[in-house]
Amino acid sequence: MMLWFVFALMTAAAIFAVLWPLGRGNRPQQDGSEAIVYKDQLAEIDRDVSAGLINPPEAAAARVEISRRLLAAADNQREPASGSSLRLRRAAAIVALLGLPIIAVGIYYPLGSPGLADFPLAQPARTPEGAQSLDNLVAQVEQHLEKNPADGRGWSVIAPVFARLGRMDDAIRAFRNSITYNGESADRRADLGEALVAAAGGVVTAEAKVEFERAVALSADDVKANYFLGLAAEQDGRAQQAASIWRAMLEKAPANAPWRSLVQAALVRVGGSPAPALSNDAVAAAKDMSETDRGAMIQSMVERLATRLKQNGDDVEGWLRLVRAYMVMGDAAKLKGTLSDARQAVARDPERLKQLNEGLKNMGLDG
């Protein structure tokens, strides 16, 4: 209410400041004092002529000039405004003073929101409808699943969200319910196993291993399940078995598989030396060779790749393949030299250098 009162006073003050002159009569701009001065000057000229101080022609010229000024001063005098004109101006001022606020209120009430309460200072802005936080959305899904526990689609949607939020117990329960109500699949079994590993701090427990084995039984080439089975073998001290699992994954994988660098790094960790990721045709040709011939062929291909990169160092993908080859071959000296040569080759091209560093980081190397 106080705010309305202040606004009313400010409006009234502004209207009065503009309309006050309309309520006043016009005052004469000249009050006659200037005309009196000119008359005194005419009388003084007459006295000067009588005293012989100025010549008659000069006196005549002076009289003409002073008379002209006297007439101009008389024309500038204004008569006061009539009573009827003053009343009209005052009526216009009153109409403006009262009419403008009435018109403003008449427009605001149908179009504005006079009954809307103030928002608290801690909430200066309202949240747009539909822009709900992730916590609110998760809470809504949880409430829905409490009422509809057999909604398999709901469990499959909320399970990975729980995992990303770090709510692993809820994620495990959701993955289990997803399997129960949606049926078995390699992906669902592998996701459940991964959640069990995360809940155990990265350890492939016996329960998780069972889930990965079930996933492989449903799909022998399931990447996630095979990787974690290799990790389980490594954690159990069976490095050779882990290397065998991961090597088989690389042999079947396309050259641009996003997880290839992860498996290769794991393979190097357990001392494996598989064929480097060069081309699918080369891998297919090497399948029927003996281990010795295969190794010789791989070595030859690596050397050809290194020679080509020395001649044309702009091929970032080629550098990454060469680095990857030396990693899986366990040749630390050549790996170190190749990293240095690769950075020097693309040092003047910021875009290629960025691409190289990102690729090295994906392989677990310092970009």
Image: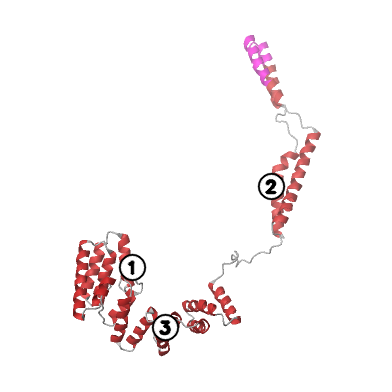
Q: Is residue 278 visible to the viewer in this orientation of the structure?
A: no
In the image, residue 202 lies at what x, y percent?
39, 83
In the image, residue 355 lies at what x, y percent?
32, 64
Q: Earlier in the sequence, mark 2 or mark 3?
A: 2
* Nearer to us: label 1 or label 3: 3
- 60 part of magenta stretch: yes
Q: Label the magenta part by its dominant secondary structure.
A: helix
Is residue 1 or residue 27 the one in the foreground? 1
* Nearer to us: label 2 or label 1: 1
Is residue 245 or residue 88 the one in the foreground? 245
Does residue 278 lie above or below 247 as drawn?
above
The segment highlighted magenta reads 45-70
The residue beneath circle 1 is 358
The residue beneath circle 3 is 218
> For residue 1, which quarter of the picture?
bottom right
- 339 part of magenta stretch: no
Q: Amino acid at mark 2?
A: Ala
Q: CA distance from mark 2 to mark 1?
A: 66 Å
Q: Earlier in the sequence, mark 2 or mark 1?
A: 2
> For residue 284, which quarter of the picture?
bottom left
Left or right position of 243 against 13: left
Query: Label 1 near label 2: C-beta < 8 Å?
Result: no
Query: Label 3 near label 2: C-beta < 8 Å?
Result: no
